Structures are given as C-alpha cells and as structure tokens.
Image (cartoon, rainbow, N blue to C red):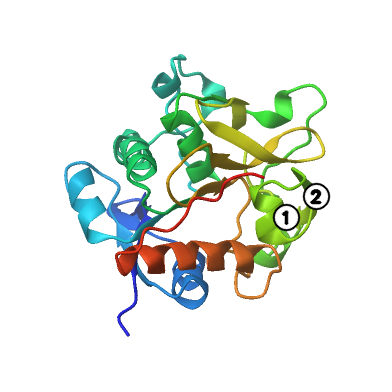
Amino acid sequence: MKRPIVGIISNTHLINDQYPTHAGGTMNIEAVSDVVGAMPLVIPADPRFVRINELMETFDGFLLTGGRPNVHPEEYGEAPTEAHGQFDRNRDAITLPLVRACVDRGQPVLGICRGFQEMNVALGGTLYPEIRDLPGRMNHRMPPEGSLEEKFELRHEVSLTLNGVFHRLLGATKVMTNTLHGQGIKTAGSRIVIDGEAPDGTPEALYIRDAPGFSLGVQWHPEWNAANDPVSRPLFKAFGDAVQCWSEGRRPSSLKSA
C-alpha cells in the first residue's frame, strides 16, 4: 500500500560554517515514518524554491518543526529586539501562509515548538520573546549541557482542558512533557484555542476552532521517543490517521472540543 506523504519543514544550517543546507531532524523523520506511517520528505522552507499551491497538491499533511531561529516579530506587528534572537524570514514566508492554507482547506498540519508559535502568529497572535524573563515563569529553555537524553527528559506537567481536544486524544488531563523553548504565546490568534498549559501558565497545546481538519500544535517536542512515549505516540497516530484519510480522498473530521 502506498504511504501518504508528509512534508517536514526544514531549517537552514551551515555545515562547517560554510556550506548552506536545508535540513530536517532525524527524530522528526523517524516519527513520521515509524509512528505516523507516512513517507517523510523534507521541504526547503524558502519561497525561491517552493510555492504554497505546489506544496498543497504534493503532500497529504505537514509537520512544522522546531528550530533555533524565531518568527520575526514584524509578522505580529512588533519591532525586533536582541531578546527576539535569530530569525529566518524565508521560513516565515512559507510556514505562515501554509498554515492558513491548511486550515482553510482542512489539510492536516501538526506544529511543534516553533511550529506551534507559527500557527499562532499565522492566525494573528503574538509571542513573548523570552518566557524566563516574565514574572512567575519558569525557564523553559533546553539545558545547555548534558546528553540528548538529559536535554529531552520530561521536565514539567501540562494541564489539559477537561473534555477538550487533547484530553480526549491523550486520555488524561495532566501529562508530562519535555521543554526546550525560549519564546511562547503572548496573545492567542483568532480561532486559536489554548487547550493545555504548563504550571506557570505558559500555553503548551492548541487547536484551531472550527478548523475543518486536523490542526493541532504543541510547544514541547513530541518527536523525542515518539514511538514509545505515552503522550507522543497517540498525538502522532492521530496525525497519521488524518493524513491517511487525506491521501485516500476522504476528508478527516475536525477534532472539535466537547
């Protein structure tokens, strides 16, 4: 049986500080292949090379990955500061209209970390440049030292809305997640529903109200240990069911709140 095709948004990198690349993390590729059950293809996130209509016709769903560069604050009406960090305007030019196109069409999209933030900005929301600088907030950033296992270890609870989309999907109102982000949602965009929060109130899970298809985002990194983690696996499996439906010409139902 032909597998559905999931487009994985890439990030730009320099190999040896010289050779430019568009790259996708192996953990994302494994999650798409092994848990989603789809063929993973990495998309160069640059409007010089791809067009939104071409992507929509080529892929059955999209995974918006994390990345070191942040969404440029001009995309949500603010001036850049040193606290906003690095940017990738080419990725902004692909992912933000891609989110809106997927939501309008009902084509499956799953946002992770930066992808979670892109979904919010695409629908008119804003971001804090540095969560740890806010009163009462914890440091959500990746530990600077240690092994991958230590950097991706489960570090805090996420409380999910009772009978909400993520509660029904994951079968619990509290789940443990990793945390590797500096920025976070400030104001939710139009139709963005915050469906889960960290203990300090930082938004961690969202869905898009009245979206005709699968449109979910999480601030944590479920691609880590996706095949075995009790939170990651059902999330990617649900995404996989949606992209399978799309590939067969059946339009997956939206995940409405109760």
Name the quarter where the C terminus is drawn.
top right
Q: Is mark 1 on a helix, strand or loop?
A: strand
Q: Name the image quarter holding residue 203.
A: top right
The residue tagged 2 is 157
Q: Residues within 10 Å of mark 2 (few under 14, many from 20)?
A: some
Q: How crowded is mark 1: few (under 14 residues within 10 Å), some or many (20 or more)?
A: many
In depth, the one of 132 and 17 nearer the eye is 132
Of the residues under marks 1 and 2, which one precedes in the sequence?
2
Q: Name the image quarter holding residue 77.
A: top left
The residue tagged 1 is 177
Which residue type does callout 1 highlight? Answer: Thr
Q: What residue do we see at 59% from left, 41% from top?
A: 206
Q: What element carries label 2?
A: strand
Relative to residue 14, is residue 250 depicted above or below? below
Relative to residue 123, is residue 43 depicted above or below? below
Which residue type does callout 2 highlight? Answer: Glu
Q: Marks 1/2: CA distance? A: 6 Å
